[in-house]
Amino acid sequence: MIRKEKGKWHVYSESGGHLGGPYNSREQAEKRLRQIEYFKHKGHIKEE
């Protein structure tokens, strides 16, 4: 989840925890959110 606070963008978890920021643009915050999602799911793939 991305929120704008005091003119800057912040990334939050769905439960409300702060994950990053402040960022100057929404695009920077979205990039960080994509990075977080990538690494969150990366460990769930089983390799044989």
Image (cartoon, grey):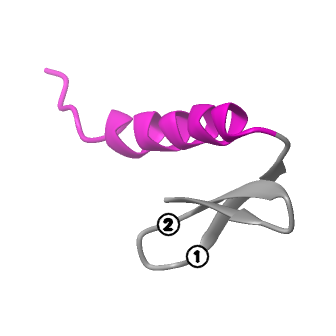
Q: Residue at x 49, y 35 (%)?
A: 34
Q: Residue at x 85, y 42 (%)?
A: 24
Q: Residue at x 76, y 38 (%)?
A: 25
Gap in angstroms between the C-alphas marked 2 and 1: 5 Å
Q: Which disc is residue 29 wearing? A: none
Task: Place residue 43 in its image quadrant.
Answer: top left
Direction from residue 21 to residue 4 in the image, left or right: left
Residue beneath disc 1? 17
* Residue 42 spot, x, y in % from top left: 36, 34
Q: Is residue 48 above or below residue 2?
A: above
Direction from residue 20 to residue 47 in the image, left or right: left
Q: Disc 2 marks which amino acid?
A: Ser
**Residue furthest out toward the front:** 7
Q: Which residues are magenta?
A: 25-48
Could you say whether the residue bearing mark 2 is in a helix, strand or loop?
loop
Residue beneath disc 2? 13
Q: Is residue 18 above or below residue 15?
A: above
Labels 2 and 1 touching (C-beta < 8 A): yes
Q: Disc 1 marks which amino acid?
A: Gly
From the viewer's side, name the closer residue of 17 and 7: 7
